[in-house]
Amino acid sequence: MLSRTFLLVIALILAFVSDASSLGDGAVIRITTWNLEWFPNGSPKRIPAEEQAKRIAAAADVLRPLNSDILFLQEVQDYDACARLAEAIRPHTYQVAICSAFKGGEQQVAILCREPAQTA
């Protein structure tokens, strides 16, 4: 899985950077990567929706002040968990560029971006 994740990360960075010319000279692209450890449940066991919401809010509280352009996330449950996190980070606007769907597992990798991804 590491090689797939690595290729996914490199591909998105190249797609984003190739469009970075619109950002202007001296532009800085902030990238954050975080292993969220069985997000949003905290373990392989499912927890109630209210507890998931608390974990999502706590992660958003950490990510919001970082003001990253791209978020690389590991060990996320699925696309829905990523979308809920993206919504919770407001007022920053993030889009789920991609979330893996590896068979037989609830530990996916995902990329959230502030700018629309050209391809994923």
Image (tube, rainbow, N blue to C red):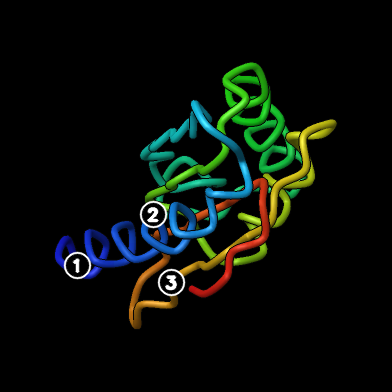
Closer to the camera in the image, 115 or 81? 115
**Which residue is identified by label 2?**
13
Closer to the camera in the image, 51 or 40? 40
Helix, strand or loop status at disc 3: loop
74 over 6 or under it: above or below: above
Q: Amino acid at mark 1?
A: Met
Q: Does 94 sit left or right of 44 as displayed?
A: right
Q: Amino acid at mark 2?
A: Ile
| Residue in the picture at 50% in, 67% down | 99
Helix, strand or loop status at disc 2: helix
Q: Is residue 94 visible to the viewer in this orientation of the structure?
A: yes
Question: Disc 1 and disc 2: Cα gap in Å?
Answer: 18 Å
In which quadrant of the rendered image does the N terminus lie?
bottom left
Label at residue 100: 3
**Which residue is identified by label 1?**
1
Closer to the N terminus: mark 1 or mark 2?
1
112 over 77 or under it: above or below: above
CB under 8 Å between callouts 3 and 2? no
Q: Give the percent coordinates (x, y) of residue 88.
A: 77, 38
The local crowd at label 3, few if under 14, some if 14 to 19, many if 20 or more residues have their Cα within 10 Å, is some
| Residue in the picture at 53% in, 30% down | 27
Question: Disc 3 and disc 2: Cα gap in Å?
Answer: 16 Å
67 over 7 or under it: above or below: above
Q: Give the percent coordinates (x, y) of residue 113.
A: 60, 50
The local crowd at label 2, few if under 14, some if 14 to 19, many if 20 or more residues have their Cα within 10 Å, is some
Q: Amino acid at mark 3?
A: Ser
Question: Disc 1 and disc 3: Cα gap in Å?
Answer: 11 Å
Closer to the camera in the image, 47 or 89? 89
Label at residue 120: none
